Image: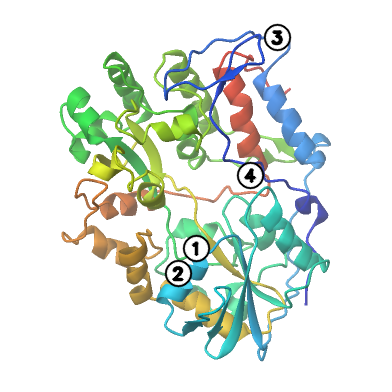
Amino acid sequence: MKKKLLSVLLSTAMVAALLAGCTKNPGTSEVTSTPAGSEVVSGNVETGNTALAAFKTAVEEKYPELKEGTVVDLVDDGNYTATDGGKEIVIYCWNDEFQNRVKDHCPDYKADAADPNKGTYKGVDVTWVITPNEGTAYQDKVDNYFLGTDTSAGTVDIFLVEADYAIKYTGQNASLPMSEIGLDDSVFADQFDYTKDAVTFDGKLKGASWQACAGGLIYRRDIAKEVLGSDDPAEVQKAVADWAAFSDTAAKLKDAGYTITCSANDTYRVYSNNVTSPWVVDGKLNIDANIMNWVNDSKEMVDNGYTGTYDLWGDEWNAGFFQTGNVFCYFGPAWLINFCMAADQEGSVAHDGGWALTEGPQGFFWGGTWICAANGTDNKTEVAELIKTMTTDKKVLKEIVEKDSDCVNSKSLLSELANDTTFTSDILGGQNPYKIFLDGVGKVSLKNIGQYDQGCNEEFQKAMKEYFLGNAELGSLE
């Protein structure tokens, strides 16, 4: 039985994250690109142009109820339906990552040689419905199914979510509690707490992930040797152990001709993953103290020339992955190291094994995919077995580590890998990263996750960029 989603959440827009980095010359409309870390910070502040006011306005446009000082409560009334006997398992996702994990590692899945989006699982036909995650396209696809306006694929059995908007679906009837498909909490006892917190609503676990996207500070070995005297992770950690040490090291790097990061946004997730309050409290916008720490620390870093304000994934940000770049470090998880740092390109730092990993000032995560059982599934048993296999079977998870370089969601397996001297990363110059990932993931908490997180995080970074560039005063939310 399909349940309607709350209409206010259906209007939530995903702002494109893959924007090209650039700087705008004050007083002109000209946009110019400059080498990573070399932008000139200057601005012309117009009277009344305040970053926090701009943030508030943008968020209230996304979520009109906040302008009235109210919130729309998420409601899961417990009206669930899950049956067996369906003739087809339909899976909604936004790319082929999970599809490939199932094809490559799930022993009971048989791929269709003629059609990559077809297969069988334990004798039941499987259809993959892939809607690329551009703008709101994927969420719209899921929304329209539960609203009953797009049932062209038939009954959906599984759909995937990301942490930024997971609560939109776990906070109401779209997703089934794992207990409703026969998987109690003990099944997921070996998984990291934050991965369960991300998809828990009113004490009900409503999804599971094979990934634990713990992050760390990824730094250039050659620059560490030159400026800090050592590229040993333990020694470098001393230089970035907290944000005060991080700033001191940034000053040393600047004197040597380097920026510590390419952008102030490089550190945003580290701060935002360590908040003690949500974005909205009692119907009003709330800026956590650690978010303001990011603002104040970043403003100082930008003003001092220790970092820039480029958008993540832009050309200038990517330039720091290469030997010709002057960027000391990035913050990221295993997938950033293995798939985004141009390891297959000559001239990149990764190609020559020139990066290393250390913990950094605070633990954090970035990314991840959660598997949800759709309310109304008519393949309850197969859905439960597929989720259990892909997120808890240690043999499957170890294969994913070895063949796909994922950091997986198993405390015991990561502990084993952390102590395995034969497991090394060529990109990290032979370093085993798993002890650092293991230490970091244990510090991550998502206790303050809320339905406004995605929009608030996106709009806050946009507004603060204008403040960092000197185009706006900070101002206040009032």
Distance of label 4 from label 1 (alpha carbons):
22 Å
Crowd band around label 4 with a 10 angstrom C-alpha radius: few (<14), some (14–19), many (20+): some
In this rendering, the answer to whether 192 lies above or below 15 is below
Task: Name the amino acid type tagged 3.
Answer: Glu
Q: Nearer the viewer, mark 1 or mark 3?
A: 1
Task: Name the amino acid type tagged 4.
Answer: Gln
Are the residues tagged 4 and 1 within 8 Å (C-beta)? Answer: no
Q: Which residue is mark 2?
A: 101
Q: Label 4's element?
A: helix
In this rendering, the answer to whether 374 lies above or below 137 is below
Q: Label 3's element?
A: loop
Q: Label 1's element?
A: helix
Residue 256 location (% of width, % of height): 26, 17
Q: Which residue is mark 4?
A: 454
Q: Which residue is mark 3?
A: 46
Task: Name the amino acid type tagged 2.
Answer: Arg
**Image quadrant assignment for residue 20:** top right
Residue at 62% across, 10% down: 26
